[in-house]
Image (cartoon, rainbow, N blue to C red):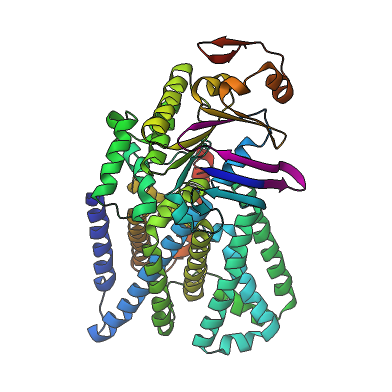
Amino acid sequence: MISIRNLSYHIDGVAILDDITIDLPKGKVTALVGPNGAGKSTLLSLIARLEPLQCGTIDIGALTIGQCSNRQLAKQISILPQMTEHVPRLSVRELVSFGRFPYHQGRPGPEDEAKVDEALQVFDLDDLAQRSVVDLSGGQRQRAQIAMTFAQDTEYMLLDEPLNNLDIAASRALMARIRELAHSYNKTIVVVLHDINYASRYADWIIALSAGKTAAAGSPAEIVTPKLLGDVFKSDAEIRMIDGHPVVLV
Amino acid sequence: MPKRFWILGILLVICCTAFMTWGARGPLHFVIPFRATKLAALGLVGMSISTSTVLFQAVSQNRILSPSIMGFDALYIMILTAAVYFLGGMTVANLSAHLSFAVSTGVMVIGALGLFSTLLRSSQNNLMRMILTGIVFGALFRSLTDFMQRLIDPNEFSVIQTGSYARFTQIETDLLFIAAALCAGALFLTWKMRFRLDVLALGRDVAMNLGLNVRRTELEALTLTALLVAVTTALVGPVAFLGLLVVSLARLVVPVERHAPLLICAGLIAMIVLIGGQLLFERVFQLTTPLAVIIDLVGGSIFLFLLLKGHRR
């Protein structure tokens, strides 16, 4: 479980996150939703210790951020950052191998190679393994990067807007894979999503942020309501229940 | 790829052999030690300059910068001028070689660390801002240098002038051992951190995610850069574009993004360029065209080419 207690974060005196206290359930897919500028990505970077904590505490399982070594944390939690324009000149296999760095520090052993092979297989990258990352399509590249975080073999995985630049087929395939990871590999996955319908369809738990505060937390059926859309997203879109999942008509 | 390394290695051996033997007419017991020290110095400078540029590029995460482009040469000449201005030309010229080497290396390590960390901190992930800051610093150092040079005695100015150009022909050989020891240590430490450099080059967030202690690694890499650059500059004077030139060539030869082959390849190319260049300079051009001028001309053209072609990262 990830426990966040009294977390606040300021940039130049402006509160980005304001006294957040939440628990993210273990072994489930948790979606962070909210309007632009609600602090979703900041919250994720703080959990992933990419930014230093200013105020409050974050516990990841038995580890407390700021009180254990970076390498210890890297075996416990991994993050897929938002894709940057800079694409390394590496083959897919080399990129995925970097996921093992926290374990071998540069000299991979047979166990590391096996884990890389598994990651390539789980994410259907066998055929692309020798291709350069530069030559891949956006969806394939995204898959390669997630395979790298998978190879890192951590209990907790954080994904920052993984559906950016993906078409509908790639988005659905990715979300289905994320669910599978959580439920068959018992991983705790936190994913920042823009589209509330994806959150409603694929997440087990949704946390809605609004102006740096938690607006609501619960299962999709409890959370995705006209009231939430009005309060958090300032939208009057209609909601229908289809097969037990709330669907926002856009 | 190993084949390319063999070719580079053979080229280097040819250059070294030619350097040692071409036109050797004097008594061998004089010629061989004389040329061997020069050869060793050139090799050392080549390895150090290429390594410092690879380190700097890994930390700043781009491919068109080298320590000297970011204002280091200007800093060196400013320190030299300041020494002459405050201590007087005769004092500086008469200082024992070891003392002046130790002092200038020390001052430059501190100065370079200050300069580089300011540059990196002021412009995280903003290449254009970093280049601009570097240029502004360079202009500031040059203006201060100009100002001090106007105030000093014209005779003392000659002390600065000899110091502010790269001098491959007269290398202070008695300093070579100290410089070699320092550089060898720095090169060894760089080699030890080659895997961490690979991770660092993936970007700050990814490196953090992979458990790398990013701040510490950056600081270590910058300290090694500063040490290598300071030692070589104190030994032979500023060589502006050599680092960029050889590392850009090495990136063409090594198609993968690994620092182990890159460090070796850049080092080999740097030694070939320096030793081969000095050979041509001494034997073919008969000491008429300074090597540094040619290196800067070719290196400057490559820098412009890279900028225009958009190889910013």
Give how far across and how far down residue A245 sits, in percent. Answer: 53, 15
Q: Is residue B257 magenta?
A: no
Q: Residue A227 sits in which quadrant?
A: top right
Magenta stretch secondary structure, dominant: strand
Give how far across and how far down residue B105 sits, in percent. Answer: 53, 77
Left or right relative to A116: residue B148: right
Q: Residue at x 42, y 23 (%)?
A: A176
Q: Residue at x 35, y 69 (%)?
A: B43
The foreground one among A105 and A111 is: A111
The foreground one among B183 and B191 is: B191
Q: Is residue B222 visible?
A: yes
Number of numbered discs on residues = 0
Give how far across and how far down residue A199 sits, in percent. Answer: 55, 24
Q: Residue furthest right?
A: A13
Location of residue B140 with respect to B60 vertically, above or below? below
Q: Is residue A27 magenta?
A: yes
Q: Residue at x 55, y 21 (%)?
A: A200
Q: Is residue A137 visible?
A: no
Location of residue B257 with respect to B72 vertically, above or below? above
Location of residue A92 with respect to B131 vertically, above or below? above
Give how far across and how far down residue A170 sits, in percent. Answer: 44, 21
Left or right relative to A109: residue A222: right
Q: Residue at x 29, y 32 (%)?
A: A121
The foreground one among A248 and A50 is: A248
The foreground one among B269 and A242 is: A242
Q: Which residues are magenta?
A: A7-32
Quarter of the image that includes the C terminus of chain A: top right
